[in-house]
Image (spheres, rainbow, N blue to C red):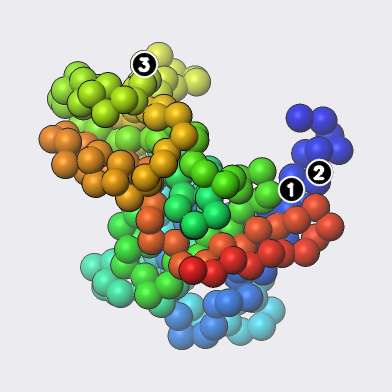
Amino acid sequence: MTERNASADSAEKRAAGIAASEVVESGMIVGLGTGSTVAYTIKELGRRIREEGLEIFGVVTSYQSEMLAIEAGIPLTTLAQHPELDLAIDGADQIDSNLYAIKGGGAAHTREKIVSASAKHFLVVADESKTSTRLDKAVPIEVMPFAKELVMKKIRELGGEPELRLALRKDGPVITDNGNFILDSSFGVIKDPEGLALQLSVIPGVVEHGIFTNVNELYVGKKDGSVKIVRK
């Protein structure tokens, strides 16, 4: 990516992330997702807490979002203390015109899905490169290490091509925050996201897959700094 394109990409993410933060009101319990776009949301919420007196609690989805939230000065809580959230804000690796999404590029989709399902409203932030007419990216699937071979076999039976995600700066596979492996599984164009989601969920040893069917609203940052809002 050229410097110019990288700058435009950052501007889109920043626009979407900040616009989403404006939905948050004092008194809310907010799920804080993981990724480069929602990082702008977290930073902006921290600014609003410092400068505007915004009073919220956040529930994080990963160690990364936890560190960002602490750095931003956002008070944190847990699902044990607040099992129902007012709002969850997260990014996506790909999202289609029906608001079905694929997540898990950061290997945090299990906790992201739990947090989003605990919220009354789930809002996704993305730049234009993440939008698509139909889903066709590989689906990250978190699996118990003990079940890896069985799960790979079952994925192939569903027409998928699973690949164990390997770490970049250590030997061996990526280990999730939950101590599991990730299988990035390509299915080509996914014609029935809800159907595939159900088929993956019943495989023994699958902890969680990266197909999200519960998105309520999408904020897409554009190159000119505007934000397109899509609702179900």
Amino acid type of the residue that numbered disc 2 sits on in the rendered structure = Ser
The residue closer to the viewer here, 113 or 213, is: 213
Residue found at the very far front of the displayed protein: 191
Quadrant containing the N terminus in the rendered view? top right
Q: Few, some or many C-alpha atoms within 10 Å of disc 1 (few <14, some 14-19, many ≥20)?
A: some
Q: What residue is pinned by disc 2? A: 7
Above or below, 71 against 36 in this view is below
Task: Give the residue displayed 45% in from the left and 29% down from the top.
Answer: 188
Residue receiving disc 3: 172
Amino acid at pointer 3: Gly
**SS for tag 2?**
helix
Q: Residue furthest top?
A: 171
Q: In the shown orientation, is residue 180 left or right of residue 89?
A: left
Asked if marks 2 and 1 touch (Cβ < 8 Å), the reply is yes
**Badge 3 vs badge 2, beta-carbon distance below 8 Å:** no
- Quickly name the residue at label 1: 10
Mark 3 vs mark 2: which is more N-terminal? 2
Report whether residue 79 is seen.
yes
Judge whether 81 appears above or below 91 on screen.
Answer: below
